[in-house]
Amino acid sequence: MPAKTSALLVTGMPRSATTWVGRVISSSPKVHFVNEPFNPNVHDGVTGQRIGFPDWFTRLDNGNAAQYEGRLDRVYASWWRPTAPRKQTKNRTALRSAMGFSARAAACKLRGGIPLYKDPIALLSADWLAKQYNLSVIVMMRHPLSFVGSMKRRQWAFDFNNFANQPAVVDGVLSDYADVIRQECDEPSSIVVRSALLWKMLMHAIKGYQAKHTEWRFERAEDMAAEPLERVTQVCDWLGLTLDDEIKKAVAEMAAKSNPTDVETGQHWWKRNVSEVGDLWKERLTQDEIKAIRDITEPEWRAFYDEDSWE
């Protein structure tokens, strides 16, 4: 359990219910939701909520963080303070969104609340962020079949140049996979193979975190889906956060069996029939793909899942 939670990072594998967990917990009036500051695809020049990294899964360390220091401090150290627009805009919707974000942050701070950063893209920097900004960390995981099936469904093909561009990644945290990373940059494989490799590499990093950070909380998406209220209750207890009526209502609404199990490609909807989501890979993957995923993700999957999980 964290000694004192001043902020919370919900990170982990992409497509592993980080949004679901983040939205549920931030339904409390004492938790302010901040969405993916590390996302390089959304350059938010109006509110300044994002940092502007050029690559996915940026790895921060004491050698490269200085160039982002001001933006990092704004997002993680001064989260409740209104920020002036970083650029002029005539988009009234964007300005209203910025004003609403700042108002919610300030109100949460006045209530003695904390920020929640939902950001799987910050996974490789989670240890640096936790130390620098005193973050409590929840790391979400998901079975490789479900992860790869979701990536295939959405046609999200990871570009391994995002790793190769970063010495702190290819020569550091993922140095064991440097040759594979460079090979995938030169001759990219199919979406299924690339996604399986990405799963293996990120789970390698997560396994390292597990060994070093016993104070963090590690959750499997499958366990959260099987017992949503029970698992959220445990997370709230761990955080020292009251399981109030707002959180209970959010769990009931966001995990209801009346919710859709799947969503259309391009949608990012967190109200799902979570009891059925775990079997979607059976509709998305061929037997040959399942065998390839199992072989590629060996031996990392054995640290988190058993044989029965492949059936």
Image (tube, rainbow, N blue to C red):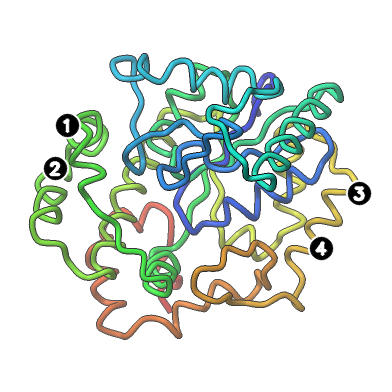
Amino acid type of disc 1? Asp
Reading the chain from its start, which is encountered first: label 4 or label 1? 1
What residue would you read off at disc 4? 252
Residues 40 and 203: in front is 40
Residues 232 and 259: in front is 259
- Image quarter of residue 63: top left
Alpha carbon separation for disc pair 2 and 4: 44 Å
What residue would you read off at disc 2? 178
What residue would you read off at disc 1? 171
- Find numbered disc 1 in the image and state the secondary structure of the residue it sits on: helix
Up the image or down, 190 lies above or below 305; here it is: below
Alpha carbon separation for disc pair 4 and 1: 45 Å
- Find numbered disc 3 in the image and state the secondary structure of the residue it sits on: helix
- The reply to whether discs 2 and 1 touch (Cβ–Cβ < 8 Å) is yes
Left/right of residue 116 with respect to residue 49 in the rendered view: right
Q: Residue at x 58, y 73 (%)?
A: 277
- Find numbered disc 4 in the image and state the secondary structure of the residue it sits on: helix
Q: Residue at x 60, y 28 (%)?
A: 85
- The quadrant of the picture occupied by the N terminus is top right
What residue would you read off at disc 3? 245
- The quadrant of the picture occupied by the C terminus is bottom left
